[in-house]
Image: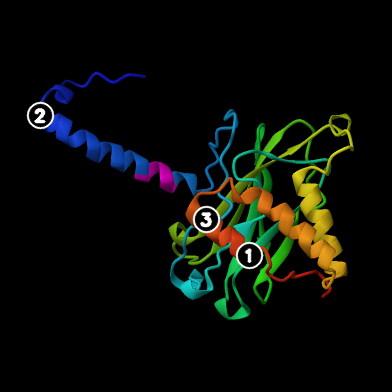
Amino acid sequence: MKSKLPWFHNTIGFRLIPALILLLSLSMNVLSNQNDEEQNFEDEEPISDVVDAGSRGICSVEPSENLRLTALAPAVRIGETLKSQPSFWFYSPYTLDNQITARFNMLKEDDKNFVEPIEIPLPNNPGFFQVSIPEKYILEKNLDYNWYLSVICNPQDESQNIVLQGWIHRIQDNDFLGDDRLPWYDQVDALAVKRCGDKTNEDLKQEWETLLDSVADQLDENRRNYWNNIIDQPMNCLGN
């Protein structure tokens, strides 16, 4: 909706416009990193925050490590799954010494509180780890879901939390022809589980690197550097 404010026509008004544009831009960046229950599900190509751009306080990681909290998810499109209860994979740069916790939840088009926030134990050492949603939650077919992973940096100040968010869509079985690779989330999970069972298999490692390389071009240069640095990081597997 166009605004017709009279003060736009004077000199002071024109000088204020750049400042207002900057202020609005900063506000949108802050909002994009929050778990907003008014998320717009009508966007044609939802943008995901899959790489943490920076951290503060006890969530900080030494710059020399060049590693960030990362979600194994597409950045510019909705990742798909065939499963009613898919698993998600993330990279954590933290150690047990960081003494921080994480929280996962998910929103749905017609149910804003689809997955209530659940506490996620981070691995004791840096590496990839799996998040599975509780059995009581079943993804419906042909619906978009917006998931969030939050690292709690400061329980007294949630503005300091690191928040990643992305999208997942459960497709109909007959939409998957089986001639190509599995949908994104299923492919990541299947390959990660294989790597957990055979961590020294070079063929699986190469397949993993190729899969993750497919997302790099979707990221800006800064986030792409972090993404590329986590590709060959170790797996944190249940029971290992």
Residue 72: x and y in percent read 67, 54
Q: Which mark is residue 11?
A: 2
Residue located beneath label 3 in the image: 223
Q: What residue appears at the point 64 percent right and 73 percent down from the top-left corner?
A: 126
Question: Do the residues under discs 2 and 3 have CB atoms within 8 angstroms?
Answer: no
Q: Secondary structure of the magenta portion, mostly? A: helix
Name which quarter of the figure residue 99 lies in: bottom right
Task: Name the residue carrying label 1.
Answer: 230
Q: Amino acid at mark 2?
A: Thr
Residue type at tag 3: Arg
Question: What residue range appears in magenta?
Answer: 26-30
Q: Is residue 143 above or below residue 91?
A: above
Q: Quadrant of residue 225?
A: bottom right
| 185 displayed left or right of 214 | right
Quadrant placement of the C terminus: bottom right
Q: Of label 1 and label 2, which has the lower sequence position?
A: 2
Taking the view exactly as shown, the residue that stands out farthest to the bottom is 97
Report helix, strand or loop for mark 1: helix
Crowd class of label 1 (few under 14; some 14 to 19; many from 20; radius 10 Å): many
Can you tell which of label 2 and label 3 is closer to the viewer? 3
* Dot placed on the residue nearer the N-terminal end, 2 or 3: 2
